[in-house]
Amino acid sequence: MIEDLFYSMELNIKRIFSNLELDLFRLFHKKVRIHPVIIIVQRGYLFFFVKNEDYFKAKSRIKFVRNYLPNKKLLIIRLEKTIAKMIFGFFPDVYIHNIDLEIDKNTGDIIITVILLTDRDKIIAVGAKGNYIKAVNEIFDKYIYPVKIKCEKGGI
């Protein structure tokens, strides 16, 4: 019951764009012809959040932005309305078997475990030196909802 309420909780992400993010906004719009809703720069990753209806167009045209930012890691994320869908949005290139929710009894922290089927999926989800999962956790903590997300291999 608590999991259902938590995962269906509606999100409201508010951001104030920095000068760098405004420059990235203009570049993205010029090359992709879509207005990103939110841009977050975190740990060397550039997260471009777009509306659901713009996702596939943006994904197919992101190479035009990458040509101008060749040493950056760019990601297109669907701006979702619920926390469960948003978690899936941060891991588009892996197969997520399940998502578990637990509350740490000592600290009260909410821990979300993304369960992946293969070691390869876990490596992709965590990123080099764990930087991607750290960036995702920082984004959730600062802008979405304070949770700890971790990835584990498991499943069937």
Image (tube, helix red, strand yellow):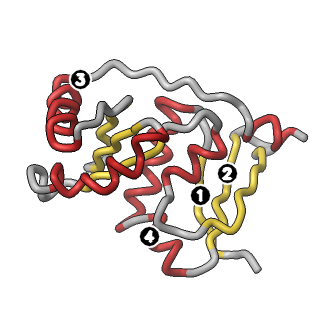
Assign the C terminus to one quadrant of the image. bottom right
Nearer to the camera, 87 or 119: 87
Q: For the residues labelled 1 and 2, say whether their Cβ atoms are less than 8 Å apart.
A: yes
Tell me where residue 6 sits by quadrant. top right
Q: Disc number at residue 18?
A: 3
Disc 3 vs disc 1: which is toward the camera?
3
Nearer to the camera, 29 or 140: 29
Nearer to the camera, 141 or 88: 88
Which of marks 4 and 3 precedes in the sequence? 3
Looking at the image, is 72 positioned above or below residue 50? below
Which of marks 3 and 2 precedes in the sequence? 3
The residue depicted at 16 percent of the width and 53 percent of the height is: 64
Which of marks 4 and 1 precedes in the sequence? 4
Which of marks 2 and 1 precedes in the sequence? 2
Tell me where residue 16 sits by quadrant. top left
Q: In 3D space, how far apart are the residues under numbered discs 1 and 4 (Cα atoms)?
A: 13 Å
Q: Is residue 16 left or right of residue 124?
A: left
Residue bearing mark 1: 150
Q: Amino acid at mark 2?
A: Ile
Residue bearing mark 2: 112
